[in-house]
Image (spheres, helix red, strand yellow):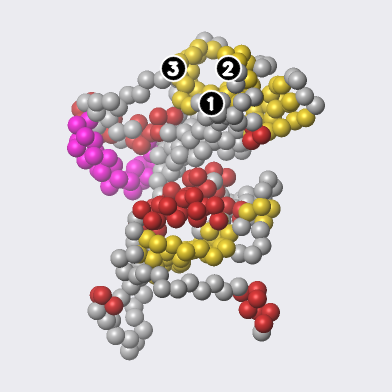
Amino acid sequence: MSVSIVSARLPTGDTPVCNVTLEPYVLIKRGETTVTADDIPEEGSPEPGLQLRSRWYRSSIPRGGAVCSVHPDKEASVQCTICLRCKVAVHLSYHCTAECFRSSWQQHRDYHKQAHANGQENGLETPGSKVVSSTMSAGGETWVEVSRCRKYTPAKDDVGFVLKYECSVVDASHPYIDLGRPSLAFTSRVRPAPNLPVRNLVPLPLPQGVAKGSASSRFTVLSYNMLADLYAKGDVYNHCPAWTMAWHYRKRNLLKELLTHRPDIMCLQEVQSDHFSEYLHPELTKAGYMGIYKKKTTEVFTGSQYTIDGCATFFRCERFHLVKKYEVEFNKAAISL
């Protein structure tokens, strides 16, 4: 049976951004049928038969001018020379305007202090900071191999460089022979992720006549809509760059914000079921919380599978313990009325 790769495409319409996972869409013709990469295991899998071999490479020469570390959609015009002397990651030293640089100066001071503490000032680098990867030359340019998985998350070392994805189908019993020609896909240059804005929360005074109470009798509650990935559609949020809606990017920022406030109780809405079990529950358990989850009763078809979201409640184990859980179905409650 003949096997060949029809095409390998990367997400289009957006520039690759640091810490946002790239997942190529690969079409494979197997005999008379066409399948996707999800139907064929990756190279190295214990499953026998056909496997998908993936390689990611980074160009050895940076492309284009530098971009702003705060606003990655803008070209840089200002650079912090102290960051250069302190061996701070180069992409963090750039800003689009002098005003942008001034507003980020406190962040730069933190970079400089950290570099000094690590012994990197005046060009001294921390031992073991360099990573050696295999290289290849093609068309007169050298490419550095950075990954052998189908999905790849650009790191800070990739910022300013172009990435290349190469894939081919191999037989697990003859792994050194490619079945057909490899397929290639290229990105534009990788941009740095923007710095997150700082929220200015407004404290609410207690209602008149309500006693403040002792510290031991008070507790904090945070309510947060997580925007389930199944609802994060470009046609609804077309004012946002597509990469900002990616769950892989959002989940880290969401967790960071939840833990920054360190509430005693978290009430989270629109929590996708797999996000609860695979990410939020394990991570918040590490932070000292216990969580319970109530999913909705109707699944939503997202184009490839059925998904469901619900509400999650987390509480700090040092302040509370679970006595009993009640689940309320609003649909049933409404019908009974």
Residue tagged by mark 2? Answer: 175
Up-down relation of residue 336 to residue 176 (above or below): below
Q: How many marks?
A: 3
- Residue at 29% across, 85% down: 211
The crowd level at tag 1 (other Cα within 10 Å; few <14, some 14-19, many 20+) is: some
Mark 1: which amino acid?
Gly
Mark 3: which amino acid?
Ser
Residue tagged by mark 1? Answer: 44
Mark 2, secondary structure of its residue: strand
Looking at the image, residue 300 sits to the left or right of residue 137; the answer is right
Residue 304 pos. (x, y %): 68, 45
Mark 2: which amino acid?
Pro
Up-down relation of residue 193 to residue 239 (above or below): above
Q: Are marks 1 and 2 in contact (CB under 8 Å)?
A: no
Mark 3, secondary structure of its residue: loop
State which region is magenta: 94-120
Q: Are marks 3 and 2 in contact (CB under 8 Å)?
A: no
Q: Nearer the viewer, residue 137 or 264?
A: 264
Q: Examine the rendering and report whether any part of residue 254 can be seen.
A: no
Residue tagged by mark 3? Answer: 134
In three-dimensional space, the C-alpha distance between marks 1 and 3, rounded to whole angstroms, equals 19 Å
In three-dimensional space, the C-alpha distance between marks 3 and 2, rounded to whole angstroms, equals 19 Å
Q: Give the numbered dot on residue 147.
A: none
